[in-house]
Image (cartoon, coloured by chain):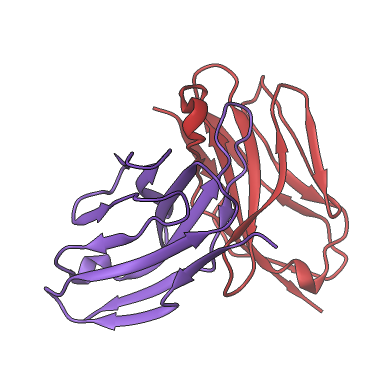
Chain colours: A red, B purple
Amino acid sequence: GDSVTQMEGPVTLSEEAFLTINCTYTATGYPSLFWYVQYPGEGLQLLLKATKADDKGSNKGFEATYRKETTSFHLEKGSVQVSDSAVYFCALAPLTSGATNKLIFGTGTLLAVQP
Amino acid sequence: DAEITQSPRHKITETGRQVTLACHQTWNHNNMFWYRQDLGHGLRLIHYSYGVQDTNKGEVSDGYSVSRSNTEDLPLTLESAASSQTSVYFCASSEGGSGSYEQYFGPGTRLTVT
C-alpha cells in the first residue's frame, strides 16, 4: 500500500543553519505531496504542497520539490530560526483518495533550533 | 473566522468508561477526520466522514465509533476506554472534491486512560 517514510528525529540545529528533512514515498502513480507543521501544543497546519512531478512547493522560506525519479519530497530551508522549532510531517494523498481527501502521514520529524 | 474546535482539551478517565470527544467546525466542510497521534507512529486515521450520515473506518478504528448528524460535528466515542487508547486525538476537516486535499486541524485533545 501507499506509505511515507521520513528521517528520524530529533534534528537539532543552530540558528541560521541549513535544514533538510528527508521524505520518500511509495505510491501508485503520482500522488499529491504535502508538508505539514505542528508547533508545540497546536494542531497540524499545511506548510506547502506539490501536486505533480517537478513541482516546487514553497512557503515561509521552506521549499520542497516533487522528484518522481527518486520518489522524494525533501523539505529544505536555507536559514532556520528558533521559531521554526516544531514537528514536521510529510504526507501524501493517494490517487484513490478522490473526494474523501484522505491523507497518509509520515511519523513526523522534530526540529529543535537553538539560538 | 472559520475554525475547528475540540473539547475537552484534556481528559483523564478510567479503564472501561465510555468517553466522547467533541469536534466542531465552522468551515462548512463536507469531510471530517479523526486521528490519533502517538510517538513513533505519527498520525493514524481512526474514522472519517464525507457527509451527513456517512461514516467510514480508518486504519485503527477498533474500540472507537463516530456519528455524523450534521455538517458541523463529528463526535468520537470510545465505547470502553483502554489504557492503549491513551493518546492525543486530532480532528480535521477538508472541503471535499478532488484536488482540494488541504486538511484543517483542531488543537487536539490529550486523553489519559488510567
Image-based side of B72 in relation to B27, left or right: left
Most distant residue in the front direction: B70
Residue A85 position within the rendered picture, expressed as x and y whole percent measured from the top left: 70, 69
Q: Residue furthest top?
A: A29
Q: Position of residue A52 (x, y in %)?
A: 70, 23
Q: What is the x, y in percent for residue B70?
A: 40, 50
Query: Looking at the picture, does residue B42 appear above or below residue B89?
Result: above
Q: Position of residue B18 (x, y in %)?
A: 18, 71
Work out which quarter of the rendered image holds the N terminus of chain B and state it. Answer: bottom right
Q: Is residue B57 visible?
A: no
In depth, the one of A88 and B82 nearer the eye is B82
Residue, x 31% and y 43% (percent of image)? B59
* Vertical position of residue B71 compared to residue A97: above or below: below
Q: Is residue A80 left or right of residue A21?
A: right
Locate residue B22: give its quadrant.
Answer: bottom left
Which residue is drawn at the image coordinates 20% and 51% (left, top)?
B62
Give B9 or A82, whichever is nearer the viewer.
Answer: B9
Quarter in which the C terminus of chain B is drawn:
bottom left
